[in-house]
Amino acid sequence: MSLVLIKTFLSIVETGSLVKASRTLNITQSTVTSRLKSLEIDVGQTLIYRQKSGIVLTSAGIKFHRYAEAMNNMWQQAMLETSLPKGMEAVCNLGCDPDLWPRFGRQLARKAHSEHATTALTVHHAASVQLCEWLTTGVIDAALTYRQTTLPNMTTLELEAEELVLHATHPDTPVRGDPNYVYFDAGPEFGSQHASEYADAGIANHTFGSAIWVMDYLKDCGGSAYLPTHLAASHVREGNLFILEEAPTFTRKVYLVTNDTALESWPWLPAILKSPNFH
């Protein structure tokens, strides 16, 4: 299977039509059509339905799309590793949940730069479920994530858990019954504990899957929400958020999952994680 066919398929999906893909790739539409047909013959399935309004992925196309992205990303990574910038000896492909970047991702990148300057760092952001898929397909070698994994040939290191505390834009906000309460979907464990503590509460009007988005929403609209203390600390110091001390608190586990083979090339990584100022 040719990488050209995969890139053409990805361009069709990204642009939404064969015509737009031909313009993006600077080839004729007939060439795009021919490549798609060749790919479908190789796969043995119809991947795309063409309609007047654009293209629609078949069920096989939806499944293939994920692997096509992985193959394309792995090819790009292979090119990067075999043509490292001058002075670089290795590359660290890190995936990071956006909510973990301010606390762990940024520190790790800074320490890698200052203490291990011969390692090139590539960072990808995604939610924890996507990070797990990327680890499986080899797109990334390590992930800062909220999701523990039992994948083969992977090492899971548990980092310092983050504390989830109820914050509000006004100090006199009630702990229970706030009509402007925003639910932060911090995973199934938090959801279970939250439901137990607030069994008498109704369903929140607004739910977000990212603490960073929750903070933006509170800044714009006001209200209360559970937030990681490390993300909300600066807003508390500035007087934009207030901790509701009477509310129950929760913890959320944090992990660094690494590919065992890649980890052998980064003997410095465990040392960074165990350093007293890495938290």
Image (cartoon, rainbow, N blue to C red):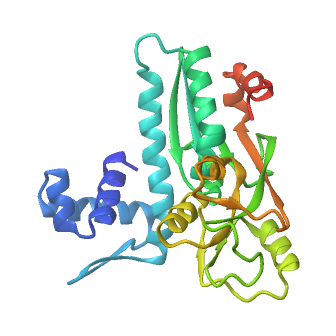
Residue in view at x 53 percent, y 62 percent: 213
Answer whether residue 99 is visible to the viewer in this image: yes
Image x and y of residue 274, in percent:
80, 27
Say whether residue 3 is left or right of residue 225.
left
Q: Which residue is drawn at 59% across and 57% down?
A: 127
Residue at 69%, 74% in the rendered image = 173
Instruction: Using residue 8 as the reference point, say whether residue 189 is left or right of it.
Output: right
Extreme residue toward the right, this view: 196
201 on left or right of 16: right
The percent position of residue 57, horizontal first and vertical second, equals 39, 74
Pick the front one: 174 or 157 = 174
Q: Nearer the viewer, residue 46 or 53?
A: 53
Above-or-below relation of 105 to 195:
above
Q: In this view, does 97 lie above or below 89?
A: below
* Residue occupying the far top of the picture: 87
**Of residues 241 and 147, the one drawn nearer to the viewer in this rendering:** 241
Coordinates of residue 90 in the picture (x, y in percent): 55, 20
The quadrant the C terminus occupies is top right
Q: Residue furthest front?
A: 172
State the count of labels.
0
Residue at image x 85%, y 71%?
Answer: 193
Residue 247 falls in image quadrant: bottom right
Q: In this view, does 84 lie above or below 125?
A: above
* Image quadrant in which you'd find residue 186: bottom right
Q: In this view, does 104 lie to the left or right of 17?
A: right
Residue closest to the eye, 172 or 68: 172
Q: Splitting the image into 4 quarters, where does residue 142 fall?
A: top right
For residue 31, say whether it is visible. Answer: no
Where does the image place residue 126, in percent across and percent down from the top left? 55, 53
